[in-house]
Amino acid sequence: MTRVCIDMDEVMADTLSEHLRRYNQEFHESLQKEDLNGKDLWDIVGFDRHERLNEFLHAEDFFENLPVMPGAIEVLHDLAPRMEIFIASNAMQVPNSLGPKYRWLQRHFPFLPPTHFVFCGDKSILRADYLVDDLPRNILRFQGTGILFSSPHNLNATGLLRADDWYDVRRILEKTAL
């Protein structure tokens, strides 16, 4: 059976929207995803605000109620009976995110077994046929086939198999894996 690892942040969970919401609320700005175009949020805000950006991520409630990326539930529910799906999150960057991420996955993806939730630091340890991730560095270090999930920060990345949304992920996997 084809094994697929799926990243959480900016692939399944819309962390950027929540980060922008908190940033805009605190600093009385109106930054939108479109303002990033190939950059991280840290690249477009003043250095004096970087510490606060990190504090948002480390807040106990940041990861608990993130919006689900459009199509993620539908597509993963469709693929799960036909593929071995693992959720692989680099949760070690924000250790207090482990509990909230676990609860978020159980709430939104109850059809995936918790034994397939992998909270790691370095995704190069993953052994699967596919990795769907928003970070090019994770794709480049992965030994299987990487699928770069489009996000504002990675729009300038080239030379990688790219999925613009969950329906693209399904099309790619059904075309190449089944």
Image: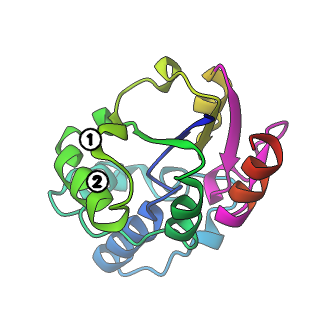
Where residue 38 appears, as percent x and y from the top left, is 69, 53
Q: Residue 57 got which mark?
A: 2
- Quadrant where the image shows the C terminus: top right
Position of residue 171 relative to residue 161, above or below, is: below
Position of residue 5 relative to residue 23, above or below, is: above
Mark earlier in primary sequence (2, 1): 2
- Quadrant where the image shows the N terminus: top right
Where residue 65 appears, as percent x and y from the top left, is 27, 70
Q: Is residue 41 visible?
A: yes
Residue highlighted by disc 1: 94
How many C-alpha atoms fall within 10 Å of the one at disc 1: few (<14), some, or many (≥20)? Answer: some
Where residue 23 appears, as percent x and y from the top left, is 36, 69
Position of residue 15 relative to residue 82, above or below, is: below
Left or right for 144, reference 70? right
Q: Is residue 63 visible?
A: no
How many labels sit on residues?
A: 2
Amino acid type, label 1: Val
Amino acid type, label 2: Leu
Q: Distance between the residues labelled 2 and 1?
A: 7 Å
- Seen at 83% across and 49% down, the residue is 175
